[in-house]
Amino acid sequence: MAGEGSAAELPRKEVDVLKGHEGAVLAVRFNGDGNYCLSCGKDRTLRLWNPHRGIHIKTYKSHGREVRDVHVTSDNAKLCSCGGDRQLFYWDVSTGRVIRKFRGHDSEVNAVKFNEYGSVVISAGYDRSVRAWDCRSQSTEPIQIIDTFADSVMSIALTKTEIIAGSVDGTVRTFDIRIGRELVDHLKQPVNCISLSNDANCILASCLDSKLRLLDRSTGELLQEYRGHICKSYKMDCCLTNTDAHVTGGSEDGYIYFWDLVDASVVSTFRAHNSVVTSVNYHPKDCCMITSSVDGTIRVWKAYTN
């Protein structure tokens, strides 16, 4: 019998395709409660959707180059985005107006995340830096710059007191903002995405040698490696399912993979897109996942048992 978190209950059934972006979709993210999602892409736009009803709600246009990442505050009132034009855009969700642009990165910006209060936004860039910006201040200057990386910073994750960042220099670095301490985990392979487990005890890191690596946050110990997919030249998301029972990630050949967290066996793999899978994002509570691709589509997945 299929138990809680079993492979039978994984979201493998395509229930909708969200179309509207022209060209590659570079990221798709659920909002905090999983009722909506935001996407961004090569067409310089952000789009707000109800993925459960297949409805496009709003398009946000102001970027001059491709948009690489987007994040929304927990109260759904504000969003931030970043990309090829080296700036962070801070938006009002309901009006679609840009409240502020944060300038300071010297090159493309790869990732953005709000802190839990939506008062600070953290960004990571090709200029080898992570920067923090105060959304409540009128200043457009960063309140903190972390520039200890030796190469492009691709991905960030936040806890209440830490900024965690993955870089092409082969490191995952954890910065404790209270005491100013930096911890470095050397993976010796370029890191293109990091994600926290739901219990926040582990970091999942996607590397450009076609392996995902699971690290113990407290010790830095390598707990497991997941392989089978192709990840050599694209930024592609990875994450854990909301039960922390499985790891999931995309592949450059359009496939999605699910691995057992503990023994790293591939429990499911299927063709999800016609090209590189750029994003996998898991619903916070339900058995549901959204994916995006260079093929220009966003797909919504649920379990066959639903």
Image (cartoon, grey):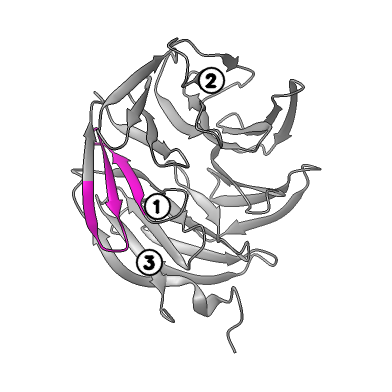
Q: Nearer the viewer, mark 1 or mark 3?
A: 3
In this rendering, the answer to whether 54 lies above or below 167 is below
Local packing at callout 3 (Cα closer than 10 Å; few below 14, some 14-19, many 20+) is: many
Q: Which of 103 and 257 is in front in this view?
A: 103
In the rendered image, which quarter contains the C terminus? bottom left
The amino acid type, in three-letter code, at marker 1 is Glu
Label 2, on which residue? 131
Residue 91 included in the magenta stretch of the image: no
Local packing at callout 1 (Cα closer than 10 Å; few below 14, some 14-19, many 20+) is: many
Q: Is residue 192 visible?
A: yes
Sequence order check: which comes first, mark 2 or mark 1? 2
The amino acid type, in three-letter code, at marker 2 is Arg
Label 1, on which residue? 252
Q: Are marks 2 and 3 in contact (CB under 8 Å)?
A: no
Q: Which residue is drawn at 54% across and 21% down?
A: 132
Q: Is mark 1 on a helix, strand or loop?
A: loop
Distance from the alpha carbon under mark 1 to that under mark 3? 19 Å
Local packing at callout 2 (Cα closer than 10 Å; few below 14, some 14-19, many 20+) is: some
Distance from the alpha carbon under mark 2 to that under mark 3? 34 Å
Q: Which residue is drawn at 44% across and 82% down?
A: 305
- Which secondary structure is most common in the magenta stretch? strand
The amino acid type, in three-letter code, at marker 3 is Trp
Q: Which of 280 and 78 is in front in this view?
A: 78
Label 3, on which residue? 301
Sequence order check: which comes first, mark 1 or mark 3? 1
Looking at the image, how many numbered discs can be counted on the residues?
3
Residue range (magenta): 36-57
Q: Residue at x 35, y 50 (%)?
A: 37
